Amino acid sequence: MQCPLLYRFRVIDKLPEKPSEAATRGTLVHAVLERLFDAPAADRTAPRARALIPGQWDRLLEAKPELGELFAGDTEGERLSRWLGEAERLVERWFSLEDPTRLEPAERELFVETELESGLRLRGVIDRIDVAPTGDVRIVDYKTGKAPRPEYAEGPLFQMKFYALVIWRLKGIVPRRLQLVYLGSGDVLTYDPVVADLERVERKLLALWEAIALATETGDWRPRPTKLCGWCDHQAVCPEFGGTPPVYPLSVRPAESGEDDQGRMGPVGAEAGRAVALEGP
Ligand code: SF4
C-alpha cells in the first residue's frame, strides 16, 4: 500500500536491506516490554525494564549478528551508548502511558494466522492482548515513533483493524478496543471497532490482494514516491531516482487493453505496518 515497487523489491526480488538503527531500536524496545511481564506484577518497574536492555540487545545480536554492522567503526562505543540511551528513554516513557503492575496480558508477541473464506491467508504478530474479566479483548501495539497527526491516523489504525479482523475470524470475538501506544511522543491512540469496520478491512484486503496478483502477473509494479523514499534502501534501482530495476524474475503476461488502470497497484489503503502479511489462495 505504501509503494508497489517497494513491495516488488522486497517480496519478489528479495533484494537485501540494511538494518536501520530506528527499526532495530524498535525491536529492542518491544523485546524489553515483552520480557518485563515475566516478572511478578510488583516488580515491573522502570529500573527493572531499563536493566533488561543490555541483555536483550545481546540476545538480538546473537540471533542476528549482522545488526553489529550498525555500529561498525564505533570504536569508542559512543554511538552505541547514545542509541541504548534512546532505547532507555522510550522504555521509561512507557511507564507514563501504562502501568504494567496493573496489567496481566493474556498474550504477548502472539503470532496469529487465519484464512478468509476467499482463501486469502492473513498473518501477523500482535504485541499484546489484554482480556478483561468481562471477556472484553483489547489489542495493544507499541510504536517507538511519534503519533501521527489525526489526518494520518488511518494508516496505523488499518494495521490494528487487520489484527482485529484476524482475531474475529479466529475466535468469533470483535475486540472491544484497539490501542496504539506511541513511545516516541507519549501518546495513546485508541479505537473501538465494530463489525462493519472489520468487514470493510476484509474487502480492502481482498482488493489489495487482487491488485498484487495482477501486478505479479503483468510485472507492472509502479513506484509511488512519498517522503518515505528517504528511508528506502532501493533508490539506486528505482526509476524515480534515475535507477533501473533488476530484470523481473517472473514470467509475465502483457496487460490487456483497458486493463492498465486496474492492473497497476492503486491506492487501496494506507501503510499496513511492520507485522502483517498476506498470502494468496
Ligand atoms: S525509492 Fe520510493 S518510489 Fe522508489 S521503490 Fe523506494 S519507496 Fe518506492
Image (cartoon, helix red, strand yellow):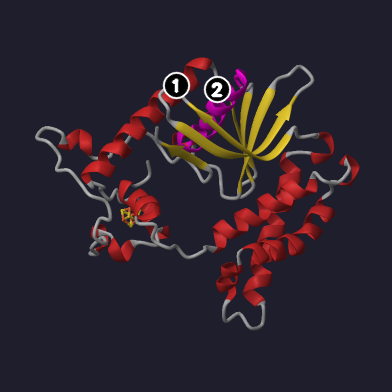
Q: Residue at x 43, y 30 (%)?
A: 120
Could you tell which of marks 1 and 2 lies nearer the N-terminus? Answer: 1
Secondary structure beneath dot 1 equals loop
Q: Position of residue 111 (x, y in %)?
A: 61, 39
- Residue 242 is left or right of residue 1, and the answer is left
The question of residue 208 being in magenta is answered with no
Q: Residues within 10 Å of mark 2 (few under 14, many from 20)?
A: some
Q: Magenta segment, which residues?
A: 153-174
Q: Inspect this view and state whether residue 266 appears.
A: no
Task: Write the residue at 11% across / 32% down.
Answer: 258
Q: Quadrant of the N terminus?
A: top left
Classify residue 194 as left or right of residue 32: left
Q: Amino acid at mark 2?
A: Arg
Residue depth check, mark 1 versus mark 2: number of the one nearer the observer = 1
Q: Mark 2 sits on what residue? A: 169
Q: Residue at x 65, y 66 (%)?
A: 61
- Ligand 1 contact, mark 2 (Cβ < 8 Å): no
In this figure, which residue is indicated by the disc labeled 1?
117
**In the shown orientation, is residue 210 left or right of residue 81?**
left
Q: Is residue 104 depicted above or below 273 in this figure?
A: above
Q: Is 195 rendered above or below residue 247?
A: above
Residue 169 magenta-highlighted: yes
Out of 216 and 203, give the one closest to the viewer: 216
Q: Is residue 150 left or right of residue 262?
A: right
Magenta-drawn stretch, dominant element (helix, strand or loop): helix
Residue 65 x/y as whole percent: 61, 69
- Judged from the image, the quadrant occupied by ligand 1 is bottom left
* x and y percentages locating residue 243 in the rendered image: 24, 64
> Which of the labelled discs sits on residue 180, or is there none?
none
Residue 31 locus on image (x, y percent):
69, 52
Q: Amino acid at mark 1?
A: Glu
> How many numbered marks does the figure carry?
2
